[in-house]
Amino acid sequence: MTLTADETIALAQPPFAKLLDIRTIEANGEDEVVAELLVREDLTNRNGMLHGGAIMTLADNVAGTATYRQMAPGQYTVTMESKTNFFRPIPLGTRVRAVARGLHIGRRTMVWEVSLYLEDGRLAAKVTQTQMVMNP
């Protein structure tokens, strides 16, 4: 079986993303990646909502995956800056969707806007993140 480039990227997730069970579900065009995460009890805060750190991890992972799609073989990426706005809680049992869209796709840096949505389509958080592209 031959995998498409997007399937290969979806499977090539880092160990931490696999631990959280973040699933890359779409890669549209050159500058959009969509991922989902099911809110399990071990990812919640003391109020039973998705922990802010898990929200930021999901956004970081989808922005990193989007950057990865743009890089040349052998390059790698690191998060340079990230800002998160939280708009509403994400309850236990929710499948949250993260959509990364490119704001700037450069050779050295890439800036992504990641929107996190509840299942009913309401915006739960917005992250703006800069990824630095590194050469070995």
Image: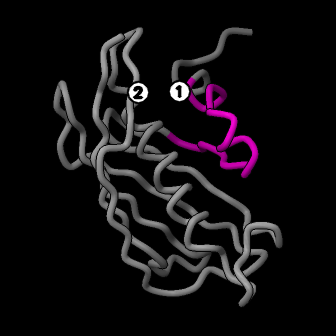
Whether residues under marks 1 and 2 lie with C-beta atoms below 8 angstroms apart, the answer is yes
Q: What's the residue type where badge 2 is placed?
A: Arg
Question: Which of 136 and 55 lies nearest the eye of the viewer?
Answer: 136
Number of the front mark, 1 or 2: 2
Between the residue at mark 1 and the residue at mark 2, the CA separation in whole angstroms equals 8 Å
Residue drawn where x is 37% and y is 44% of the image: 32
Classify 13 as above or below 37: above
The quarter of the picture where residue 105 lies is: top left
For residue 17: magenta?
yes
User: Residue beneath label 1, please?
Assistant: 6
Residues drawn in magenta = 9-26
Residue drawn where x is 78% and y is 75% of the image: 93
Classify 17 as above or below 117: above
In the image, 104: left or right of 40? Answer: left
In the image, 18: left or right of 86? Answer: right
User: Residue beneath label 2, please?
Assistant: 69
